[in-house]
Image (spheres, rainbow, N blue to C red):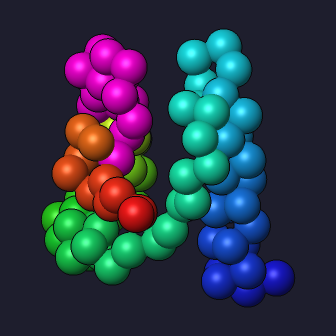
Amino acid sequence: MGYISLAMLAMGIGTLIQSYGRHGIGTGYPLLFHTTILYLPFAVMAAKRGGLDAVAGLTVIAGLVEIMRSRLLLRARGGSSPGEKSGSRQDLC
């Protein structure tokens, strides 16, 4: 199985977990996971300076930051939809 297939499988599993939204894990909304190139330059720089251990550490720290950020957004949401807080809400008339 290629890396692209594994990435797609992981994104599908992540989307299901995110959509389930029970016991403090996931939002309960069908938010799709996606891959991005933005992480790559930082991962390459970490690999050059500290090897794969540094890349693993970078990934763990990025995940922890996202967990903390999600908790802050959950408190800030206060009853409105996620799109309203991010500024991406579009009214359909």
- Please tell me which residue lies in front, 68 or 74: 74
Q: Main secondary structure of the magenta part?
A: helix
Left/right of residue 85 with respect to residue 31 in the rendered view:
left
Instruction: Name which quarter of the figure residue 28 lies in.
Output: top right
Residue 52 position, x and y percent, is 40, 61
Can residue 80 be seen by looking at this rendering? yes
- Please tell me which residue lies in front, 86 or 36: 86
Instruction: Examine the rendered structure and indicate whether residue 45 appears above or below residue 11.
Output: below
Number of numbered tags placed on the structure image: 0
Residue 78 position, x and y percent, is 32, 16
Most distant residue in the right direction:
1
- Please tell me which residue lies in front, 67 or 21: 21
Q: Residue at x 64, y 71 (%)?
A: 7
Q: Residue at x 57, y 17 (%)?
A: 24
Q: Quadrant of the C terminus?
A: bottom left
- Please tell me which residue lies in front, 69 or 48: 69
Left/right of residue 23 with respect to residue 62 in the rendered view:
right
Residue 8 position, x and y percent, is 68, 73
In the image, residue 91 lies in the stretch drawn in magenta: no
Instruction: Examine the rendered structure and indicate whether residue 89 appears above or below residue 63.
Output: below
Q: Quadrant of the N terminus?
A: bottom right
Most distant residue in the front direction:
93
Can residue 71 be seen by looking at this rendering? no
Instruction: Name which quarter of the figure residue 89 lies in.
Output: bottom left
Instruction: Examine the rendered structure and indicate whether residue 86 appears above or below residue 72.
Output: below
Q: Residue at x 24, y 39 (%)?
A: 85
Instruction: Name which quarter of the figure residue 51 lies in.
Output: bottom left
Residue range corresponding to the magenta coloring: 67-83
Residue 60 position, x and y percent, is 39, 41
